[in-house]
Amino acid sequence: MDNIYNSVVEALIFASDDPLTPAEIINAIKEIDGSDSEITEDDIEKTVDELNIKYDQNEIAFTILKIAHGYIHATKPDHAKYVGYLSTEKTKRRLSPASLETLAMIAYKQPLTKPELESIRGVNSDYTLNTLLEKNLVTIAGRAETVGRPLLYVTTDEFLKYFGLKQISDLPKPREIEEIMKDEDFLEQKRRIMMSGIEEKAEEEELQSELERDSEIESELEEDNENTIE
């Protein structure tokens, strides 16, 4: 195998969210460079071993793990507590579909009042607005010169950082959004997000069910204690 493929193998593993098998790596290379490319699974394994040696020698923070019949980049155990903290903080900042919908409307129509927002969404937006305010993704920019002088909501610099934008004008145009929504990669990411949301909802329901059961048990114990005292 040509040495040029060492960095290609590294890049493919790094870019994958799931363990990448040697066969998948070889297939990706041959799809680009042609089926006559001389590369074997032994070459892949040797390359991964060499990369891990290089990472250790240079005290790099990550390594390549061999799991589920494939390879995946991961941080070293020494850094687990730090990465775990960051992951927890990101989880706290995760937005629900309702919050994303509200945020998108404010971003594209700002400044926007709560009555205008609720007119578009068709539902009460108190909770989602409070969530976005707490996360500093939107802020109050004054009052509208209309009846009741409702508050005006706009996005913040934190919003730009959250979505990796330089300025608000970098938001995709409606025509670009239509093209993005037809993209296969976008559809796959949407499917994963939806599945993640379903799993999270199931976990929340299970937790709520456990809390209700615990509450029932506590009530029964209290009743038993009262009857015993009597």
Image: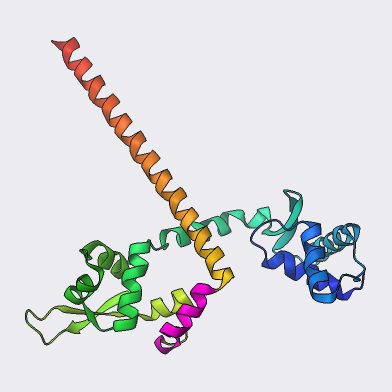
Which of the pair 171/62 is nearer the observer? 171
**For this view, does 220 lie left or right of residue 23?**
left
Residue at 90% over, 61% down = 40
Q: Which of the 4 quarters of the picture holds residue 228?
A: top left
Residue 21 position, x and y percent, is: 77, 56
**For this view, does 224 lie left or right of residue 49?**
left
Q: Which of the 4 quarters of the picture holds residue 18?
A: bottom right
Residue at 34% over, 82% down = 108
- The residue most toward the left is 147
Compared with 168, 195 (above or below) is above
Q: Main secondary structure of the magenta part?
A: helix
Which of the pair 30/128 is nearer the observer? 30
Which of the pair 20/175 is nearer the observer? 175
Residue at 19% over, 76% down = 116
Compared with 97, 146 (above or below) is below
Q: Which quadrant, please, contains the C terminus?
A: top left
Residue 41 visible somewhere in the drawing: yes
Residue range corresponding to the magenta coloring: 168-182
Residue 17 position, x and y percent, is: 64, 61
Compared with 18, 225 (above or below) is above
Residue 60 visible somewhere in the drawing: no
Residue at 45% over, 84% down = 175
Q: How is the image coloured?
A: rainbow
**For this view, does 79 lie left or right of residue 162?**
right
**For this view, does 216 lie left or right of residue 66?**
left
